[in-house]
Amino acid sequence: MADMITQGVTMNRLIHQAVRRDLARFTDALNRFTPGDQARATALAEAFGHFDTMLTHHHEGEERTLWPVIGDPDAGNRDDVAGLTTEHESIAAGLAASRDAFGRLGTSASTADAAAASAGLAQLREAAETHFAHEESEMRGLCEAADPVALGAAFKRMGRDASPAEGMWFMQWVAEGLSGQDAAALNGTIPAPIRMISRLVAGRRYAKVQQAAWS
C-alpha cells in the first residue's frame, strides 16, 4: 500500500508542478504582451484553453473518484476533504474569470483584455497555491487512512473518463521539462507504449502550441 500511495501522491505533485509552471508562463507572457499582437493573443488563448481543460479534468476527477474514498466518514476525514472541495471551487472561479478574459483577448488583442486576463490569472494563481499547499501537506495522511482496496481502484480510475485526445495531451503536459527522479516517477506510472503513443499523437501539436505562446 505504501508504494501505491507514494505513486499517487507523486503523480498529484507532478500535476501541481505542471500547473505552477504554466501559471508562471502565462503571467510572464501577459507582462510582456504588446497590445495589437494578434498572433500572440491567439496563441495565448489557445494555450489557456488546453490548460483550462487539464486543470478542470484533474479536479473534477478527484472529486468524482478520489474524494469519496479518502473522505469516508469511517476514516474521520470528511471535514478535511470538504475543505479541499471548497478550495477547488475557488480555483474554478479563478478559471472562469481567466477563461472569459483569455477568450476575449484571443479576438481583440487589446490592452483591456490583457489586463483582465492578468487579473483573472492572479486570482487563479492565489487560489491554486493555497489549495496545493494544503493538499500536498494532507494527501498522504488522507490516503493512509482510506480503505486500501477502494483507494487502489480510485487511483486506477483517475483520468479514465477523459477523451483519448485529452489523455494524450495530458501526458505531454505533465511530462514537459521533467528530469531525474520526477521523470523516472512519471515513467514508472505510465507504461512506455502509452508514452510513445502520446508523443506520436500529441507531441508535435503540443510543442507547436507551447512555442507559439511562449517564444
Image (spheres, rainbow, N blue to C red):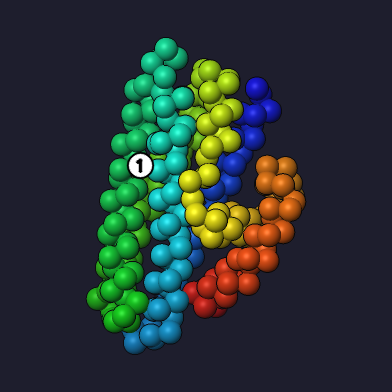
Badge 1 local density, few (<14 within 10 Å), some, or many (20+)?
A: many
- Where residue 129 sits in the image (x, y, percent)? 42, 46
Which residue reaches farthest top?
74
Residue 74 lies left or right of residue 18; in this view the side is left
- Where residue 162 sits in the image (x, y, percent)? 49, 50
* Figure check: 38 above or below 142: below
Observer-nearest of 12 and 162: 162
Residue 117 lies left or right of residue 181; in this view the side is left
Going 60% across and 66% down the picture, which residue do you hit?
Answer: 202
* Figure check: 31 above or below 128: below
Observer-nearest of 8 and 136: 8
Going 67% across and 63% down the picture, which residue do you hit?
Answer: 199
* Figure check: 83 above or below 33: above
- Where residue 178 sits in the image (x, y, percent)? 67, 55
The quarter of the picture where residue 77 lies is top left
Q: Which residue is mark 1?
A: 88
Going 54% across and 71% down the picture, which residue do you hit?
Answer: 210
* Figure check: 123 above or below 130: below
Q: Is residue 181 visible?
A: no
Tag count: 1
The quarter of the picture where residue 153 lies is top right
Q: Is residue 100 visible?
A: yes
Quarter of the N terminus within the rendering: top right
